[in-house]
Image (spheres, rainbow, N blue to C red):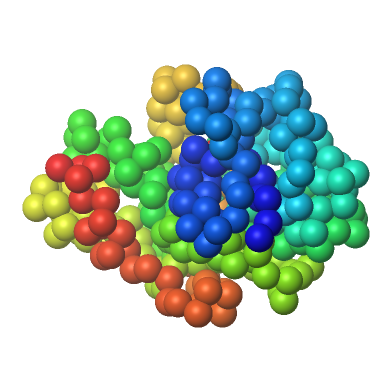
Amino acid sequence: MSRILVVGASGTVGSELSRLLAAAGHAVVKTTSRKPTSPDQVQVDLVTGAGLKAAFEGVDRAFFLAPPGHANQEALLAPLIDEAKARGLRKVVLMTAMGADADEAAPMRKAERRLEATGLPFNIIRPNWFMQNFNTFWIHGIQTAGQIFLPVGQAKGSFIDARDIAAVAAKLLTGDGLANRAFDLTGPRALDHAEVAAILTQATGKAIGFTDITPEAMLQGLLGAGLPKDYAEFLVLILGYFKAGYAERTTDAVQQITGQAPRSIEQYAQDYRSAWV
Ligand SMILES: NC(=O)c1ccc[n+]([C@@H]2O[C@H](COP(=O)([O-])OP(=O)(O)OC[C@H]3O[C@@H](n4cnc5c(N)ncnc54)[C@H](OP(=O)(O)O)[C@@H]3O)[C@@H](O)[C@H]2O)c1
């Protein structure tokens, strides 16, 4: 059994990943930037680097992500990757995002390259847009106006359930078979946001629609919600990639790695129904 460091362990992917790893009998070291409340947590602040080195004590495998809210993901991930290299970890899985490899100058791509250059056994997973955004980031419009407000027109996305991302990460972290490969992770099919709204309506019995907004309105909304300007601009930029059709592709990576088909958005809507009613 391994001792596995999970960065972002209280988050959407990290909490499910930690649960899967612990259920399989591994010791999980969960990072949090807050004050730990249980013995399996360690305090790590990726912005300041506080607690980072100590978190690797006795660890042989690790899962890394850059927390949302920061546009310079490489600055946050580089110290983790460098410490993994110094410790000679047996496997590192880094989660970036689908499309991260499209621009060599992008901070997420630089982090991917840094990990590749360590010589450690690694995997990079690049998920598409999460289904769980509808019960987290985009929930305000649904709760207050019954609308998903996004600047994406009729473009389609092959949304993925974060639980499937966690299942992939768990397999890659604990197996050595697929080392040194990158995988784009998607859900089973592509839908536009009006179709997603109809599925949420069906699951909840509550009328939920989709309103296409301008990138400028999106930016103002994000700034109004208190997001840092560079991160708000980053989000609007990548929503533009969604609108341009780059999120439509599907891959069979979830099935290939886990042996299970990725969850449908209907399943997701059913399981998360209580978030919207
Ligand atoms: N949402 C999408 O559609 C999507 C699509 C593709 C890729 N991604 C990528 O997925 C990642 C986010 O994953 P997620 O949604 O599972 O995360 P999440 O639910 O937003 O959780 C973020 C985690 O980061 C931790 N965190 C926040 N600030 C921190 C800091 N300063 N130092 C250390 N940890 C900190 C939080 O823990 P504490 O509060 O306990 O500190 C939390 O566990 C991002 O890298 C994003 O680019 C997202």
Q: Position of residue 167 (x, y in %)?
A: 51, 63
Q: Where does the C terminus fall, quadrant-wise? A: top left
Residue placed at 57% from the left, 37% from the top?
A: 40
Residue placed at 39% from the left, 49% from the top?
A: 132
Residue 30 picture quarter: top right
Q: Position of residue 224 (x, y in %)?
A: 42, 20
Residue 232 picture quarter: top right
Q: Where does the N terminus fall, quadrant-wise? A: bottom right
Specify whether residue 99 is in view.
no
Residue placed at 58% from the left, 75% from the top?
A: 257
Q: Nearer the viewer, residue 4 or 9?
A: 4
Q: Nearer the viewer, residue 60 or 190?
A: 60
Query: Is 25 left or right of 58, judged from the image as shown?
Result: left
165 vs 252: above or below? above
Residue placed at 56% from the left, 79% from the top?
A: 256
User: Where's ligand 1: which quadrant?
Assistant: top right
107 vs 99: above or below? above
Query: Is 148 left or right of 111, judged from the image as shown?
Result: left
Specify whether residue 42 is in view.
yes
Q: Position of residue 79 (x, y in %)?
A: 81, 36
Furthest residue toward left: 205
Q: Nearer the viewer, residue 216 or 198?
A: 198
20 vs 146: above or below? below
